Amino acid sequence: MATTDTRALALDATSAADLEASGLEYALVPADHEGFEPFLRAVSRGFLGEDPSADEVESARRALTPRRLTGVFDRSGVAPESPVATVDSWATELTVSPGRTIPLWSISAVTVAPTHRRRGIARAMLTGELRTAAAAGFPLAGLTVTEATIYGRWGFSPAAWASDVVVDTRRARWTGPVAPGRLDFVSRESLPERLSRVHERVRLERPGSVPGWEGRWRGVAGLTPDAKDGNKVRAVSYRDAAGEERGILVYTLDPGPNDDYSAHVLSVRALFADGDEAAAALWRFAIEHDLVGEVKASLQPAVPPVQWMVADRRAVTATLTDHHWLRILDVPATLSARRYARALDVVMRVEDPLGFADGAWSLRIDADGVAEVDAAPESRAVDVELSVGALSSLLLGGVRARELAAAGLVHGSAQALAEVDAAFVPDVAPLLDIWY
């Protein structure tokens, strides 16, 4: 697990100077400082939310105390204590292949007030984050996005997809495995610990995953002050035949269309399963729940296994969306972190306008899937040319080089691209199963 305390890192001097030239101040906002409440209100405003209550402020303060919170301030405005832009970042890690992780600079809560758009604020904040991360030795940055048109300009690109799944239970007769363990209802108060324990095992085996945190699990459990439907949250635990807890399903129930009491909607807030057995048991519970006509679940695998577990696969619809966006900062450290499916020896020319990953890189993978990456000698011909965004999308193996080549984002011979795809194919399809 990453241990760097990002709060102790200095603000990026270039971004500070650029913002100062525009009459703006760049400053850290500690969660235990009086400036935290205005910061949180600015974040809520940026995401079109309600002003947080006093209880919500204190709950958020508890959750965000370990984070690096940065604001941009217009001290000449009518509310000089309120930031006109925000960003939240912290050190964590990303699973790049089963059992292998890499330090990750995570970014969240990026907002710019509508009153201060087109003044270079987002550019200063995001490049400042990347420069700070790179200087601190982070090989990779990541974020989840609400808008897909913004972050490509800083080299971020989608690397893991997720599906929003809807199951019509009246058509979806269960034909999947019958799990030998047992299900039990568990209390909401026990969920943060249970979710953390199960998810920690799951995320280490799934490329694209990151660790959760207490505030995330309390939110899933409906235990935070902003959980308007907290009292509706229910949860079941799956234990295998040996008595080991292998999965957790957290959900709510709402009336169906036209208040049809026999067709409630079961909305999954979290379904974490350590193994196929637990996944089948929890999905069967949801689909066969009494008086439920529809099951909805977000952040599921791109091709959800549940569609193979019911008699009518068209009873399951899955809407795919890009979810985890990555940005490589250090090519050798990032590409050498994961295991690969086969040997490979290529030179990649990476174009990075911000300079972090720019250059020609020799990628040599041995028969055991272990990679060595170095600056390529000038005598070696380049086999593949691509942008840093394209390389970031390829990293986890959820995107094919030949697909990006068809879009004009990767260039190389058909043989070279086929060899890259064969080496990068993952053992497990990438998935990020939480928001951050």
Image (tube, grey):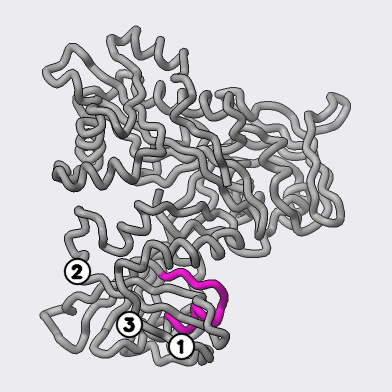
122, 132: nearer the viewer:
132
SS for tag 1?
strand
Query: Cα distance, mark 3 to mark 1?
Result: 25 Å
Instruction: Name the image quarter holding residue 361.
Output: top right
Residue 360: in magenta span: no
179 sits to left or right of 267: right
- Upstream in the sequence, badge 1 or badge 2? 1
**Residue occupying the far top of the picture:** 21
Amino acid bearing label 1? Arg
Q: Say left or right for 135 vs 188.
A: right
Residue 332 picture location, percent across and down: 72, 36
Question: Residue 151 appears at what percent x and percent y?
Answer: 43, 36
Is 120 placed above or below 96 here? above
Q: Residue at image x 26%, y 60%?
A: 223
Q: Is residue 123 visible?
A: yes
Query: Is disc 2 placed on a helix, strand or loop?
Result: helix
Dot 1 alpha-carbon crowd within 10 angstroms: few under 14, some 14 to 19, many 20 or more: some
- Percent x, y for residue 390? 59, 41
Foreground mark, 2 or 3?
A: 2
Q: Amino acid at mark 3?
A: Asp
In the picture of the structure, the residue carrying the numbered disc 1 is 182
Pointer 2 local density, CA inside 10 Å: few below 14, some 14–19, many at least 20: few
The residue carrying mark 2 is 231
Chain-order first, disc 3 or disc 1: 3
Residue type marked 2: Asn
Given contact means CB atoms under 8 Å apart, are the residues at marks 2 and 3 in contact? Answer: no
First in sequence, mark 2 or 3: give its number: 3
- Please give the range of residues in magenta: 271-282
Spatial CA distance of label 2 from label 3 is 25 Å
Residue receiving disc 3 = 168
Could you tell me which secondary element the residue under label 3 belongs to?
strand
Please tell me whether residue 310 is drawn above or below residue 349 in the rendered image.
Answer: below
